[in-house]
Image: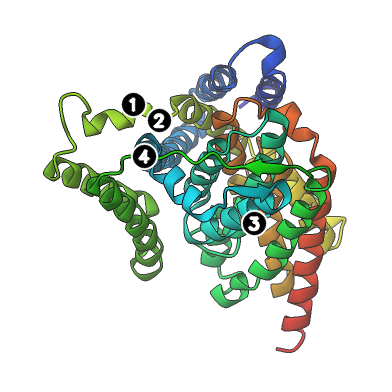
Amino acid sequence: MPEFVSWILITLAVLALIGIIFEEVIHINKAQSVLFFGSISWVILFAASIGTPEHHRIEEGLKENIGEIAALWLFLTAAMTFVAYLNKKGLIESAIFKVLPQQISERKLMLLTGLFAFVFSSLADNITATLVSVALILSLQLPAQKTLRFAAIAVFAVNSGGVAMITGDVTTLMIFLADKAEITSLLMLSLPAFCAVLALIALLMLPMSDEVTVTKTSHDLQQVDIVVAGIFLLTIMTTIAFNVLFDIPPVLTFLTGLSIMFLVAKGMGEDTEDDPIMDYVRRIEFDTLMFFLGILLVVGALKEIRALDSFVAVYEYLPAWQANYLMGLFSSIIDNVPLTAALLKSDVVMNPAEWLALTYAVGVGGSLLIIGSAAGIVAMSKIEALTFGSYLRFIVALLLAYTLGYALTMGLGTLIFAQT
């Protein structure tokens, strides 16, 4: 395949990134622009490789890429449908309002939001945790500028909470399956990750000094709504348990939970002509799904031309702890899954403490930019005021929190593994 093809694909990837950043300037939906660049990248790959030995590899690469996208789409569809139902019925708002007092300071509210996002993402996957956290933030009906601060904390806290669990973050699972870190070691990431979240909250709450009056609304909850909420929570718990015990993919468990939700709703009389239970699938944000599709197509094409392999060369010039820190920064621009895959397939040699630091870096580093993680993309699709530019205002605070978490991870890992 001609060398100029690689440069064309890299250019298209840069244009896709520019399209996301300047969405409000060019007035083209980010999902539309990214989907175009992702699709055309694969068209070019196939056209340029026809008649060459690489054509079969490109074909297999597309099948793998589409398989990953399909699994993500199905998982998102199931998770979003649950959340759409619970939001429509007002159950999430009701649960939040029962915990929150009538009057609460903005700082305390921000702390509770960050803690909720961190803890919930330790139990559920990042996407589900973000959906629920964003629903919580929007239900508070805060001014746009304050909502942005809460959103930044939610994205960072969700990524931080999931990094210690193999079911909470894909890259953590990849590193675990490659025998680079043990579950007990990964669990230690919770402490430095939690400290980093507290640091970010402390930084972003400084200008917040007002009191918030929580307007509590009443919802006429039915028994079926409580049952569906129970099915949702049970689905989350069984997803974690079945993945650990039986290696069952999370998407399969969530689809099973969704099917049970449909059947239970039907049996309890919730599935009516006026309000069909299947209609909740149509209430999810398909813009988010199309955006994921485009992003993963772009990254998949870059993977085929081995453009991501160049990141591995950093370890030839820098100590592992410095290179790992940079990998976290890179993961805010390049999807952390292929980035982690490239590192695992290379001959990079690191000790357990450094592998632990890499796990934190690629798991949390994506929080630095709104497009750097699934949590950020989901939040951006749900909160109108949250854009690439508006999120970028918090880059200094996010970078400081990320750096603190990384330093604590390195220190804790070095201390523990030095004694073994």
Please, what is the three-letter code of the amino acid marked with disc 3?
A: Ser
Q: Position of residue 301 (x, y in %)?
A: 57, 32
- In this figure, which residue is indicated by the disc labeled 1? 282
**What's the mark number on residue 76?**
none
In the rendered image, residue 185, in percent from the top left (x then y), is placed at: 62, 75
State whether residue 25 appears in this view: yes
The answer to whether the residue labelled 1 contacts the one labelled 2, judged by CB atoms less than 8 Å apart, is yes
Q: Is mark 3 on a helix, strand or loop?
A: helix
Q: In the visual, does 108 lie left or right of 219?
A: right
Residue with the mark numbered 3: 160
Q: Nearer the viewer, residue 309 or 145?
A: 145
Mark closest to the chain's N terminus, 3 or 1: 3
Tell me the SS state at disc 2: loop
| Tag 4 residue | 219
Side of 83 relative to 7 (left or right): left
Q: Nearest to the eye among marks 3 and 4: give it.
A: 4
Rendering coords of residue 63 (x, y %): 41, 36
Secondary structure beneath disc 4? loop
Disc on the earlier residue, 2 or 3: 3
Kind of residue at disc 1: Arg
> Is 309 or 193 nearer to us in this picture?
193
In the image, residue 378 lies at what x, y percent? 55, 36
Q: Callout 2, which amino acid?
A: Ile
Viewer-nearest residue: 220 or 3:
220
Alpha carbons under labels 2 and 3: distance apart: 25 Å
**Tag 1: Cα neighbours inside 10 Å, few (<14), some, or many (≥20)?**
few
